[in-house]
Image (cartoon, grey):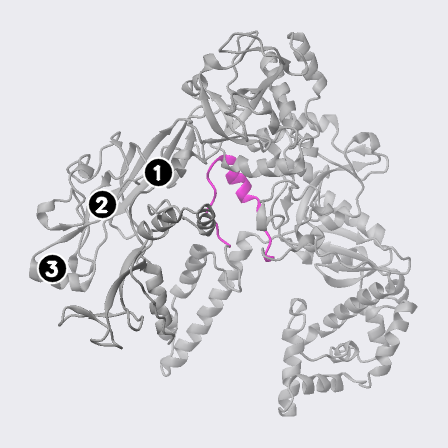
Amino acid sequence: PVDIPIITLMRALGLESDKEISGAVSLIDEIESELESSFEKSDITTSKNAIVYISKRIAPGMLEEFQIKRAETLLDWGLLPHLGKQPDNRREKAQFLGEATCKLLELKLGWLKPDDKDHYGNKVIKFAGQMLADLFRTAFRNLVRDMKYQLERSGQKRGINAVSAAIRPGIISDKLNNAIATGNWGRGRVGVTQLLDRTNYLSTVSHLRRVQSPLSRTQPNFEARDLHSTHFGRICPSETPEGSNCGLVKNLALSAIISETTKSEDVVEKLYEIGVSHFSDVKPDVQRDGARIFVDGKLIGYFNDGENLVKTLRELRRTSKIHSHVGISIHQQDHTDATKRLYINCNAGRVLRPLIIIKNGKSSLTPDILDKILKNLLSWIDLVRMGIIELVDANEEENCFIIFDEKHAKKATHLEIFSSAILGAGASIIPYPEHNQSPRNTYESAMAKQSLGFSTPMMNTSTYVRQHFLLYPQTPIVTTKAMGLLGLDKRPAGQNCVVAVLPFDGYNIEDAIVISKASVDRGLGRTFFYRIYEAEAKQYPGGMRDNFEIPNPDDNIRGYKGEKPYRLLEEDGIIAAESNVVGGDILIGKTSPPRFMEEYREFESSGPYRRDTSVSIRPSETGVVDTVVMTQSNEGGKMFKVRVRDLRIPEIGDKFASRHGQKGVLGLLAKSEDLPYTADGISPDVLINPHAFPSRMTVGMMMESITGKAAALRGSKFDGSAFVGEKLDQVKDTMKAAGFKYSGKEIMYDGRTGKPLPVEVFIGVVYYQKLHHMVADKIHARSRGQVQMLTKQPTEGRARGGGLRFGEMERDCIIAYGASMILKDRLLDESDKADIFICERCGLVAYHDVKQRRYICRVCGDKGKISSVSVAYAFKLLLQEMQSLNITPRLMIKEKV
């Protein structure tokens, strides 16, 4: 990099005189005096000399003609290309540099504050469309480059035929397909594409409104992760993951709208009509005291009264003469002499939020207009066009005075529409979230996306590989307004339970919950789990292909699994619908030709043979065949899909959670006759431990319990929306009218003895969610099984039937305990025991001589005595790896004691 003085650069861009340069920066005396030293140091006075000066620094050692050409190309194409790439744009670039210099000097003088890079006025969000446009641009450049190369290579060929032959369309399609398949977008951007989360409707909506930050997950980046004041109404304060992604993966608030690109030319035209002076013919007093007008960061000109221009432009926007997504903001200065700047943004990706406009101290949303909205005579778009609702970006919000209540409307400019809209989709389903400790709302935002409801209304025709379906979903009786707006009241993911806060023989300690077996028998928490298995008949070279059939052991089939797994297949090799299947049963019978050429040769000599490539149900799963579909693959081959249905009834170890981050696993399915009951004979569905509340401070759950009880008594739902939910006074009145205590406590009787419990018990109705972490998917044990090819140790993981890792901490415990035979058993005998042969004389590994049929030491020959030693196979591997590094390991061996 070469440092070039700003004065010289501005001269090279066409501002020859000191007066022009000074005018481009500022006419304010203090700033001009700051520039004096720079003018004094610069001894270049003409534009031509300035270009020569730059050319010698960027291209030393070249001919002068090439140096100047290189410098001019750099000024036009390399410097601020967004302002244009022609020589005519150079003065514009000089003005831009002048503005940058002015801001820098104002910052030095203390008139400006440094820019906040975490302010949402300084950020844009990229859409999927923009990301694909970037990718297509790169792919298209590659196509043009390749086409040029192909034409140059073809040489003499000319005309249309040569051009069409030079085009290879796969360059674009392969690049796009590969990027979408892998998520690798180039320039270090990975993980751009993600598989849409279809666990339930809320998880899908939340995933579509997610905002990813490109910052490194390994760096602290505290400021970037923190909640910023400009997130209000734009980014959800609660919904963010735990761990390294915390604060970097965000979710849009319910009210957030992303701006679209609008034509800046129309706005510029309007500005010049209003009377904005272009920077080339502006009067000195307007230039010094007026406001600088910027459209999309580009200096358009000057205007003597910035505040009035802002009012005029906002009025034009409210009357739909300017697009509603255009952002208009004036930079408020702390110092009286500082330059006034008016910014107009027409770019896409700014996060806007809707607000009600206040005119003359009164809301524009009058009762008449509200009535028309309720009658469906007015839509949202109509309200924006009529100038009742305004979409405000983060920069413009700095100029606004926003209130929550119309009582304080005298000085205000805007009124909030709905206080709960500052939350995202995940957090907006929590009732009374303002009464919970903050992290609990964050936990629930994550857990709500794991709750089981139904992922799509087309459950029987959807082709997702894994799906869960709650059999008896209920809408919560304590709901929020956002649930109705998002449509979650029609697509619920949970059930209302009578919950008592009470220990039960220690079965609900440490967050476990006790559930009534009678409630489970009535359908509480029952789900269907669907998994799709598929197989395709492929074509191979030489006319070979896969066949769907029942493999016959008499036909020289390799990999035949015995008669039992194939017992349910029909004649065509496919299982019948509604067949009961267990782990290992074959669903689709299929045979394939040999895999490698060597096998083909063997095939010619030893007679025909085929491989068994049948599809079986996973070893740990059971179920009923739900649907069998025959279809065609993309390549035109026959394809079968088999969907297996498994009824999951809650069992010990399944995970449940309320809507307040209070998660717990099922610790006991208790008989309902053993559970405590109230004076009215109501036995709770769920018992949770009282220790769940004090440290976690989920007061919202207590309020939901009381409100749920009142809703059940009243026979209608209660609204628990954040900040604007129904007041507890109404709950109190309902409870009193029904003869219940407002505290939510009741005297309960022990189901086993019939005696009253010594204390009153807090009991109410809480909405519980079943999460997709089920013990049936987690349980794993192994006695023997596969081993790794390299180390001969057991494989890892449940899916591969792997062993349970006996790690270094476990080893340390056994050593400390002194049980050395257990240690030998786990780490040697039951893991990777291997016998190697060692020469007792030199300690080196011996080798087996095939002719003499004995082990011989390479060093000692016949003098050496060879003995068998039991070691771990991994240790034998280490010895060999050390030998490959020219290190000679010697084992000194003695007789086994």
Name the amino acid type tagged 1: Arg
Residue 384 position by quadrant: top right
Regarding residue 321, the answer to whether it shows in the image is no
In terms of secondary structure, where does tag 2 sit?
Answer: loop
Q: Which mark is on residue 614?
A: 2
Using residue 750 as the reference point, say whether residue 457 is left or right of it.
left
Q: Is residue 65 visible?
A: yes
Label 1: few (<14), some or many (≥20) within 10 Å?
A: many
Q: Image check: 510 left or right of 321?
A: left
In the foreground, 612 or 626: 612
Mark 2–mark 1 CB contact (< 8 Å): no
x%, y% of residue 673? 46, 12
What residue type is disc 3 on? Phe
Comes first in the chain, label 2 or label 1: 1
State the residue position of label 1: 531
Distance Cα–Cα, label 1 vs label 3: 37 Å
Q: Please state the horizontal and vertical placement of residue 465, each as a whole percent of the image.
A: 37, 41
Give the extent of the magenta segment: 192-216
